[in-house]
Image: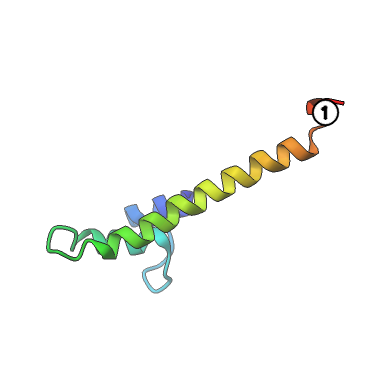
Amino acid sequence: MSEAALSFLGLGMPVTKPSLGSLIRSGFEYIFSGSWWITLFPGVFLVLLVLVINLLGDWLRDVLNPKLYKG
């Protein structure tokens, strides 16, 4: 998420390396010209990626934390 934010601002990976932030930034120029999907798909993928990582972290905390054992 941090890399995508930095790449969106132009401070992340080089232009020759693809990243979600640079894909969103390059599609942002065409959002009002009818090519909204250029920004939508990388943005949705980034949101889903962050959601999956958060859910995985919550699940691991629940499984590995002995203080949450209700036995």
Colour scheme used in the picture?
rainbow
Other residues around mark 1 within 10 Å, as few (<14) / some (14–19) / many (≥20): few
Quick one: 56 or 17, which is closer to the camera? 56
Residue 61, quarter of picture = top right
Q: Percent x, y for residue 6?
A: 40, 52
Residue lying furthest left: 33
Q: How many labels does the image show?
A: 1
Quick one: 25 or 60, which is closer to the camera? 60
Quick one: 70 or 1, which is closer to the camera? 70
Res. 56 in view: yes
Residue at 35% across / 62% down in the picture? 41
Residue at 65% across / 39% down in the picture? 58
Residue at 29% across / 60% down in the picture? 39
Residue lying furthest bottom: 16
Kind of residue indicated by mark 1: Tyr
Tag 1 secondary structure: loop
Left or right: where does residue 31 sit relative to residue 3? left
Left or right: where does residue 5 sit relative to residue 60? left
Res. 26 in view: no
Where is 67 relative to 61, above or below? Answer: above
Q: Percent x, y for residue 1?
A: 48, 50
**Quarter that holds the C terminus:** top right
Where is 8 relative to 15, above or below? Answer: above
The residue that mark 1 highlights is: 69
Residue lying furthest front: 71
